Image: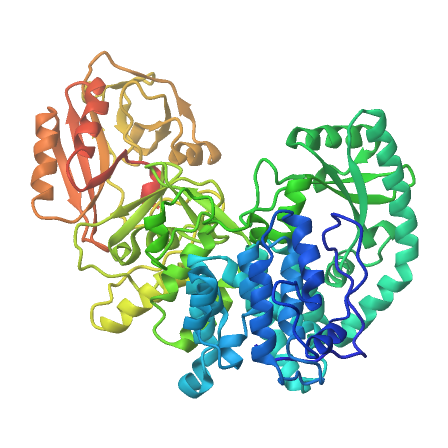
């Protein structure tokens, strides 16, 4: 956590921070830090240098014990004494600033104590054991979590391995990442004296890793300011243009938004809804994105209205009143209260228009939702303080703890990072994983849920559920329909993964094309690297998007339609002397709805009404013929059985068919593909009513996962 210095030439970036109380005068940290070097406070007196931290802390936690903060400051000040930042400021100004950032967000006392000490082990003679003895195991854990690994020991791998260590610690305690984010924010604020190339390097890591982490942890107050600071360093020209645009448009925007806000206050007051209506200016990156999206901006585009209420139900009351008194922009409505974002964010989003066409975006939330929206996991305090653990459990030390705030994306990240073979793979995979903005939830047949990044496929779901046992997956059912493993999933899908019986089976190389998650890609890549001679061949699949695709497989040639006498076919055509042919593409049986067409040779071809072959004949203008089922109950039908390969499968299937009373007219078994086998049977049944029971008996044969009537689609 090397100390950077402030750059007076860099203009401050406006942020949309929490508006929970009257603003206090800005604290001059340089003056406080130098004053701290003149002497320490009395034994039991809070040092003047952290008075502002105490004030911010007490605003959120009125009953907090400040004694740990006093002792932590004294240790930090004495251990950093004589160390200076690159700008000439005393080093103690850095941990003070980081702690103030967290105190403003509402962090609890343990986090602030660790924040004051976060650089002591890395940059001074203080040891982790000393921190543990004086401040307890939790503070020791947090300080250790944010302490960098030495370049002397790790060389070029020091940075990725430091982040790996930090993420593992975050998996046990999310407060580790809270401290790191505040630390990086202060360093980014004071990056101006660094060499341009170092500024660029730090800004890129912030953009690729820390900003996505801040987004995922819901700490919007830190994320938005980090975005603006990175924007200024990596894109100075666009930043300058956006800054000028904001400067020129702020007055007009403030007037337009102020007028709409005042009208909204009047409307809500007359409706008897107690609400606070605030105008929130957009940060620079937000204005830049809107400019690229819309081109010319109007006054109200430079900010948004924030409406704060007491109860969840009031949010919807406010929404109704605003939509009644203004013209709502329906396409802009989003309900993140009923369906919260994966990072804890809850709010109603809408947009309303005045009579003159001026449109204002509106956010509606409770005060508690606003606190969580700004501070994310920081607002949740200490997740272990009220967990009902007994003293013995706490005394067990830092055994791995199940964090109730750990989101699904963090669990996935921790799972795959263990399998990353080297720092370079970890570093590149981490950046790629964090670049995926949205998360979806899919559901297993047992009612469990899997969190996956947007765009994930059934391959990703398989490795998320089974780990390396997913190598044996053969296919999937998505929303009840058979689907390829390359099928792209959407939020809310139900997924049943189908696995083969051979535990030694491995994935084909094509699965890498469908894998979106690092866990899947690493597991597949590792198997392919260790089994270069055993990679199974697979016909290329194309991931299905939108409607679900049926599982592709090599198909046999369509079975020829059988020419039979009317009593054999079970169907009678209203065409004297015509032979009846039951189409082999769909094999209709009583009491299927059918369509019949005259074909060459004086025959009539009978299709199921929904068969694509029937639709094709209609389109070709073939004459239709009336046909009816004869009184005979016998029928002939073609069934497809999808199964995993195993010994005695064919014998068990034919036995099940015989027990059901059906006679096998013909049978085709295709060569196995990825341990999957497709069987095609043409069967004669004594009674068409036995067909459902026959199909059920075939499905109950071990290894068979689907039995269906033959259709023209299966001959494609």
Compared to residue 9, the image places residue 665 above or below, namely above
Locate residue 625 relative to residue 24 in the image: left or right: left
Q: Toward the viewer: 704 or 59?
A: 59
| Residue at 12% from the left image edge and 30% from the top image edge | 657
On the picture, is 293 further left or further right than 382? right
Residue 148, horizontal then vertical, whole percent: 48, 76
Whether residue 403 is visible here, answered yes or no, is: yes
Image quarter for residue 538? Answer: bottom left
Q: Picture coordinates of residue 556 (x, y %)? A: 24, 47
Report the side of 403 relative to 179 (left or right): left
Q: Position of residue 711 (x, y in %)?
A: 32, 36
Q: Position of residue 276 (x, y in %)?
A: 79, 38
Q: Which is nearer the eye, 23 or 565?
A: 23
Quarter of the image holding residue 599?
A: top left
Q: How is the image coloured?
A: rainbow
Please state, as top left, top right, bottom left or bottom right, where the N terminus lies in the image. bottom right
Kindly indicate the quadrant of the structure image that contains residue 518.
bottom left
Q: Considering only vertical position in the picture, is 657 above or below 460?
A: above
> Could one spot residue 2 in this view of the protein?
no
657 or 40, which is in the foreground?
40
Residue that protrudes farthest toward the front in the picture? 43
The structure residue drawn at horizontal position 88% and vertical position 52%, both measured from the top left corner, is 253
Report the number of discs: 0
Residue found 23% across the figure and 34% down from its top: 639
Say which of 635 and 452 sits in front. 452
């Amino acid at each position: 956590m090397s100390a950077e210095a402030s750059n007076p030439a860099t203009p401050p970036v406006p942020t949309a921070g929490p508006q929970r109380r009257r603003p206090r005068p800005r604290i001059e940290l340089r003056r406080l830090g130098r004053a701290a070097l003149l002497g320490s406070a009395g034994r039991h007196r809070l040092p003047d240098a952290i008075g502002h931290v105490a004030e911010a802390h007490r605003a959120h936690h009125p009953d907090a014990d400040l004694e740990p903060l006093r002792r932590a400051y004294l240790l930090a000040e004495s251990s950093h004494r004589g160390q200076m930042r690159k700008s000439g400021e005393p080093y103690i100004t850095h941990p003070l600033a980081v702690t103030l950032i967290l105190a403003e967000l509402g962090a609890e006392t343990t986090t602030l104590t660790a924040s004051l000490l976060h650089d002591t082990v890395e940059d001074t003679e203080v040891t982790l054991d000393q921190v543990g003895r004086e401040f307890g195991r939790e503070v020791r854990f947090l300080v250790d979590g944010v302490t960098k690994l030495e370049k002397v020991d790790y060389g070029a791998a020091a940075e990725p391995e430091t982040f790996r260590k930090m993420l593992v610690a975050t998996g046990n305690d999310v407060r580790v990442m809270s401290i790191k984010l505040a630390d990086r924010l202060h360093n980014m604020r004071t990056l101006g004296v660094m060499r341009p190339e170092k500024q660029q390097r730090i800004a890129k890591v912030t953009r690729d890793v820390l900003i996505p982490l801040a987004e995922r942890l819901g700490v919007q107050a830190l994320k938005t300011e980090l975005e603006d600071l990175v924007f200024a360093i990596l894109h100075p020209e666009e930043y300058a243009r956006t800054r000028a645009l904001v400067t020129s448009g702020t007055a007009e925007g403030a007037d337009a938004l102020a007028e709409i806000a005042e009208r909204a206050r009047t409307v809500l007051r007359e409706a008897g809804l107690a609400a606070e209506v605030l105008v929130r200016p957009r940060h620079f990156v937000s204005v830049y994105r809107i400019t690229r999206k819309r081109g010319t901006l109007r006054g109200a585009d430079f900010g948004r209205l924030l409406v704060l209420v007491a109860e969840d139900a009031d949010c919807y009351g406010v929404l109704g009143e605003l939509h009644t008194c203004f013209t709502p922009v329906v396409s802009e409505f989003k309900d993140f209260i009923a369906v919260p974002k994966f990072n804890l964010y809850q709010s109603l989003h809408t947009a309303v228009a005045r009579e003159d066409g001026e449109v204002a975006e509106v956010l509606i939330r409770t005060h508690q939702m606003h606190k969580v929206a700004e501070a994310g996991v920081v607002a949740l305090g200490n997740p272990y303080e009220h967990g009902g653990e007994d003293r013995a459990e706490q005394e067990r030390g830092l055994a791995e703890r199940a964090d109730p705030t750990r989101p699904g994306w963090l669990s996935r990240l921790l799972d795959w990072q263990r399998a990353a073979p080297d720092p370079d793979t970890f570093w590149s995979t981490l950046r790629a994983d964090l670049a995926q903005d949205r998360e979806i939830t899919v559901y297993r047949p047992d009612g469990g849920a899997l969190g996956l990044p947007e765009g994930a496929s059934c391959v990703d779901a398989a490795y998320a559920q089974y780990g390396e046992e997913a190598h044996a997956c053969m296919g999937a059912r998505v929303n009840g329909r058979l689907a390829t493993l390359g099928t792209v999933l959407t939020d809310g899908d139900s997924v049943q993964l189908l696995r083969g019986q051979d535990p030694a089976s491995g994935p084909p190389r094509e699965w890498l094309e469908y894998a979106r998650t690092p866990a899947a890609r690493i597991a597949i890549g590792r198997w392919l690297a260790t089994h270069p001679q055993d990679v199974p061949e697979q016909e290329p699949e194309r991931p299905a998007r939108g409607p679900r695709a049926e599982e592709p497989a090599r198909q046999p040639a369509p079975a020829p339609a059988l020419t039979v006498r009317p009593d054999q076919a079970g169907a009678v055509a209203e065409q004297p002397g015509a032979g009846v042919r039951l189409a082999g593409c769909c094999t209709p049986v009583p009491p299927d709805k059918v369509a019949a067409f005259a074909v060459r040779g004086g025959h009539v071809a009978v299709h199921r009404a929904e068969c694509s072959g029937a639709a094709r004949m209609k389109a070709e203008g073939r004459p239709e013929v009336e046909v009816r089922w004869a009184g005979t109950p016998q029928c002939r039908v073609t069934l497809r059985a999808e199964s995993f390969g195993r010994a005695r499968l064919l014998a068990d299937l034919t036995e099940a068919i015989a027990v059901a009373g059906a006679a096998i007219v013909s049978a085709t078994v295709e060569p196995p593909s990825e341990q999957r086998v497709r069987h095609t049977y043409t069967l004669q049944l004594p009674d068409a009513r036995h067909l459902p029971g026959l199909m059920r008996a075939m499905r109950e044969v071990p290894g068979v996962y689907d039995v269906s009537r033959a259709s023209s689609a299966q001959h494609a």
